[in-house]
Amino acid sequence: MARKKKHYEKYRKKNPEKEKRNKTFTIIIAAILIVMILAQIGLFQERRKLEAEKTKIEKQISSEEERTKELKKTQKYMTTDEYIEKVAREKFGLFYPDEYVLEEE
């Protein structure tokens, strides 16, 4: 048993140089972890900002697609005979030859 005690005592002795290396290593690891955490926080905030911008742009695209549909619908209507007649009557005062026009006083 005495032999085991001596064996363990050998490892129990503190080596100041080794302790200094361990502290330095611990500080370096801690600094690296802090830098990585700060970088992740920055990336997370940037991601949230970009996702908000993406949502805004998607809404704009949706709005513009609706506007495009309405414009195509209007364009299609403007090529119909009904629209052409309406413009001819309202803007130019034109009527069919066999048509009677009643005017209000």
Image (cartoon, rainbow, N blue to C red):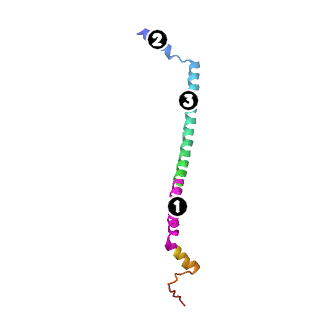
Q: Residue furthest left?
A: 1
**Left or right of 1, for residue 77:** right
> To which residue does mark 2 refer?
7
The three-letter code of the residue at mark 1 reads Thr
Residue bounds of the magenta highlight? 57-83
At a point 55% along the width and 48% down the height, the residue shown is 50
Q: Which quadrant of the view contains residue 46?
A: top right
Q: Assess whether residue 76 is covered by the magenta stretch.
A: yes
Disc 1 versus disc 3: distance between alpha carbons? 57 Å
At a point 56% along the width and 80% down the height, the residue shown is 94
Q: Position of residue 26 (x, y in %)?
A: 55, 27
Q: Residues within 10 Å of mark 2 (few under 14, many from 20)?
A: few
Dot label at residue 29: 3
Q: Residues within 10 Å of mark 3 (few under 14, many from 20)?
A: few
Q: Nearer the viewer, residue 81 or 102?
A: 81
Type of secondary structure dominating the magenta stretch: helix
Can you tell which of label 1 and label 3 is closer to the viewer?
A: 1
Relative to residue 40, is residue 100 depicted above or below?
Answer: below
Dot label at residue 68: 1
Q: Secondary structure at mark 3?
A: helix
The three-letter code of the residue at mark 3 reads Ile
Q: Secondary structure at mark 1?
A: helix
The answer to whether the residues at label 3 and label 2 have Cβ atoms under 8 Å apart is: no
User: Which sits earlier in the primary sequence, circle 3 or circle 2?
Assistant: 2
The answer to whether the residues at label 1 and label 3 have Cβ atoms under 8 Å apart is: no
Disc 1 versus disc 2: distance between alpha carbons? 86 Å
Can you tell which of label 1 and label 2 is closer to the viewer?
A: 1
Q: Residues within 10 Å of mark 1 (few under 14, many from 20)?
A: few
Q: Position of residue 72 (x, y in %)?
A: 51, 63
